Image (tube, rainbow, N blue to C red):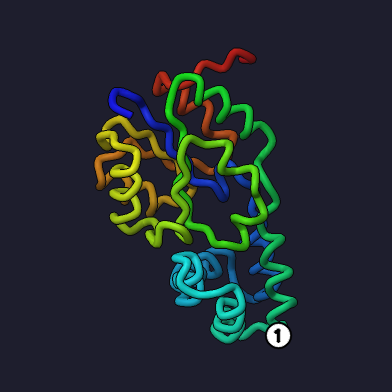
Amino acid sequence: MPGKKVILFDLGGVLVESAGRVALRALLPSTSEQEVLERWHRSHAVNLFERGQVSSEAFARQFIKEWGLQLTEAEFLDSFAGWVTGLVDGAEALVRSLRRQHVVACLSNTNAIHWARMPELPGQFDQCFTSHLTGFMKPDLEAYEHALRELRVPASSVYFFDDLLPNVVAARAAGINAFHVRGFAQLSPILRAQGLYEDTNA
């Protein structure tokens, strides 16, 4: 894709609605949101599952034990599947509009269960880089390097959007133009400021 600009999106918390933090807080009411988030990112069970290295059943067993949850594997997996609820309103239209001028891809730490909940997603993007299929997770440098190799563009041609600052910092270290956004509403102003998007409804 030489000469093309690439817009690279994280999914959860940016283009996709996720109830994961709320669900975890409900399971661990005495734990703060920040503590839950930090524990999630340190979790060995999550790391293995989101790299595609264990089955859903093995993930459930390990996660329940690791977090001390009073749930059966079936109960946990049923709840876990519902953490992802679909694209944010307006996300599909934004991506479709951007694809008229740019290559649009996604780079997401996700897993087989949540990916299966959104069968429409692969068709929304020119390319998808999901951790459970590539084996690479943000903020590891390999995740960004793999995406750049597959896209066949220099890092300077890529504009990346993520809701987690460590992922943004790592992308910048790889030479990518990276932006920290706290939700879908913050995307359009940045895209316009970078000359990547003209909102015809504005």
Picture residue at 55% right of the left edge, 69% below the top: 36
- Whether residue 178 is situated above or below residue 142 in the rendered picture: above
Please tell me how crowded label 1 is: few (under 14), some (14-19), or many (20+) other residues with Cα within 10 Å. Answer: few
Q: Position of residue 82 (x, y in %)?
A: 71, 60
x 69%, y 35%: residue: 89
Could you say where residue 35 lies in the image, as x and y percent from the top left? Answer: 52, 69
User: Label 1: which residue?
Assistant: 70
Instruction: From the viewer's perspective, tell me whether residue 154 is left or right of residue 162.
Output: left
Q: In terms of image quadrants, where is residue 72?
A: bottom right
Question: Circle 1 sits in a helix, a strand or a loop, which is it?
Answer: loop
- Which part of the image, by quadrant, shows the N terminus? top left
Say if 14 sits above or below 55 in the image.
above
Side (left or right) of 54 relative to 115: left
Q: Residue at x 67, y 54 (%)?
A: 117
Q: Is residue 72 above or below residue 12?
A: below
- Of 168 and 76, the residue lying toward us: 76
Q: Quadrant of the C terminus?
A: top right
Numbered circles on residues, count:
1
Amino acid of disc 1: Gln
Residue 135: horizontal and vertical position, in percent?
40, 62
Question: Does 82 sit above or below residue 8?
Answer: below
Which residue does the image show at 50% across and 70% down from the upper left? 49
Image side of residue 16 versus residue 34, left or right: right
